[in-house]
């Protein structure tokens, strides 16, 4: 199998019927990310970008490319949830990458923020028989810390390593659940509200597959932690949808891309229909406990914290 340039191919994008050599594949990935950033105006000249860095393949590639493409101030935020060696090893890779790139980084732990780690939460869940999945706590607390710390250090954008597979899974998951609000928050530039307390999230990798990200990292020797599954991850609707999508992608190449593309068209049409051509400046509530922005009286993070402390 040969690349269009005549060299030996190392990757085939089956939905396009196109094969790539190492050099052309690297160019393809970089062009893909630049196109997403440019088309959606994700990063402007004066933006300060905080990258949510886990040390895994997606966020590592994201930091590498943003540093390569832009002269903006870029820094990384790593969150230590307290997931034993799994997180220690991934943070070690994240630190290695930051030092290689000359990027400033900050490591924030659940322990210093909330007074306990994920292992403590798991213990509480098991002891009390609480019907809340560990991933719910972890996801809410991570987003809470990332927004708060990014704002604290002056970031105007928070870049996260959501890839094509993740986005396709989220689109189908929200469809299955009938969750219109979350469906409308998909896309490379998610969110319906502009507010000075909410740092805008961006997803530059949304059109790259997990396989493409892995391969680019290997070709370009980007350090990353390669253990796929968190030890606390449990069976969920997302894992079921992931399995179905992988089977469809294998049989019908391009399925994931088409789902993401279609969901984006639906999302934009729906937003236009309700008068949202772009996110609007809206005053929102502040949590009466922590004073962070929320659509409720008490934010989700504080609600979960109260459940843990009172259990």
Image (cartoon, helix red, strand yellow):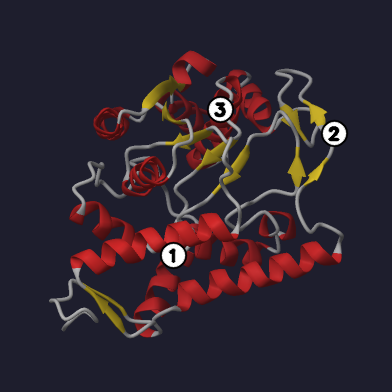
Structural distance between the alpha carbons of marks 2 and 1: 37 Å
Above or below: residue 118 compared with residue 160: above
Above or below: residue 278 compared with residue 177: above
Give the label, 3 or 1, closer to the camera.
3
Residue 91: x, y in percent? 31, 30
Which quarter of the rendering shows the C terminus?
top right
Residue 203: x, y in percent? 52, 51
Q: Which residue is mark 2?
A: 283
Q: Which residue is mark 3?
A: 150
Residue 210: x, y in percent? 35, 60
Q: Earlier in the sequence, mark 3 or mark 1?
A: 3
Task: Kindly indicate the quadrant of the structure image that contains residue 14.
Answer: bottom left
SS at circle 1: helix
SS at circle 2: loop
Q: Earlier in the sequence, mark 3 or mark 2?
A: 3
Task: Kindly indicate the quadrant of the structure image that contains residue 265.
Answer: bottom right
Above or below: residue 18 compared with residue 304: below
Q: Which residue does the image show at 70% across and 71% down from the upper left?
A: 266
Residue 130 can be seen in this image:
no
Q: Which residue is mark 1?
A: 242
SS at circle 3: helix
Above or below: residue 84 compared with residue 182: above
């Amino acid at each position: 199998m040969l690349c269009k340039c005549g060299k030996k191919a190392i990757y085939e994008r089956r939905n396009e019927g196109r094969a790539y050599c190492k050099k052309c594949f690297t160019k393809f990935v970089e062009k893909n990310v630049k196109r997403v950033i440019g088309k959606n105006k994700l990063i402007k000249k004066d933006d300060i970008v905080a990258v949510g860095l886990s040390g895994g393949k997606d966020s590592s590639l994201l930091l590498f490319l943003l540093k390569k493409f832009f002269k903006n101030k870029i820094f990384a935020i790593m969150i230590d949830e307290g997931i034993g060696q799994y997180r220690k090893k991934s943070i070690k890779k994240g630190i290695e990458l930051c030092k290689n790139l000359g990027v400033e980084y900050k490591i924030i732990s659940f322990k210093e923020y909330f007074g306990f780690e994920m292992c403590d939460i798991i213990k509480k869940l098991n002891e009390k028989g609480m019907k809340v999945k560990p991933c719910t706590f972890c996801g809410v607390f991570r987003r809470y810390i990332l927004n708060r710390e990014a704002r604290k250090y002056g970031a105007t954008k928070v870049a996260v390593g959501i890839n094509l597979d993740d986005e396709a899974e989220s689109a189908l998951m929200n469809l299955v659940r009938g969750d219109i609000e979350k469906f409308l928050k998909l896309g490379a530039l998610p969110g319906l509200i502009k507010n000075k307390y909410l740092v805008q999230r961006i997803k530059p990798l949304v059109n790259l597959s997990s396989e493409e990200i892995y391969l680019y990292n290997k070709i370009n020797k980007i350090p990353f932690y390669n253990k796929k599954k968190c030890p606390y991850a449990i069976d969920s609707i997302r894992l079921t949808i992931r399995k179905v999508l992988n089977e469809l992608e294998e049989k019908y190449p391009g399925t994931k891309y088409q789902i993401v593309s279609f969901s984006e068209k639906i999302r934009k049409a729906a937003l236009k229909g309700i008068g949202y051509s772009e996110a609007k400046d809206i005053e929102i509530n502040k949590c009466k406990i922590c004073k962070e922005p929320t659509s409720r009286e008490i934010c989700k993070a504080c609600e979960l914290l109260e459940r843990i402390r009172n259990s």
